[in-house]
Amino acid sequence: MLTTTRQFVTTGLVALTIASTALVTASQAEAHDNFGRGLAAGVAGAIVGGALVAGATNAYGYGAPVYATAPYGPPPYVYGRGPVVSYYPSCHIAWHQDRWGDMYRVRVCN
């Protein structure tokens, strides 16, 4: 009983697919000389797109454009502790690979 129901549903879906493709197929393409309309639509789209881009706000939330300026003078001196010099080597464990592809751990000291 289950097999016949499954076959019936499958047959119905195939018939529905064939019928819908026969009804929904596109008509034949018709080419006309509409260069003027296409040009006008392109120009209008460019004007609208340019207005949208020009009206966008900057990162600070203001409508005016922000221009990058070059910094003047040397960078300010920062007072503080100098680099830390260690008298003992700093070591860590790293994984290395031998020529056969086997991994092993080594101790690496600076």
Image: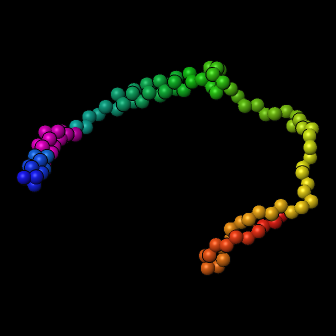
**Measuring 10% from the left and 55% from the top, which residue is drawn there?**
3
Vertical position of residue 24 compared to residue 103: above or below = above
> Magenta stretch containing residue 2, yes or no?
no
- Magenta span: helix, strand or loop, mainly? helix
Vertical position of residue 94 compared to residue 41: above or below = below
Look at the image and tell me whether residue 9 can be seen.
yes
**The quarter of the displayed image where residue 21 is located:** top left
**Measuring 81% from the left and 33% from the top, which residue is drawn there?**
71
Q: Residue furthest front?
A: 1
User: Closest to the observer: 13 or 59?
Assistant: 13
**The quarter of the displayed image where residue 57 is located:** top right
Q: Position of residue 74 (x, y in %)?
A: 88, 37
Q: Position of residue 19 (x, y in %)?
A: 11, 43
**Measuring 85% from the left and 33% from the top, which residue is drawn there?**
72
Q: Which residues are magenta?
A: 14-29
Q: Position of residue 40 (x, y in %)?
A: 39, 26
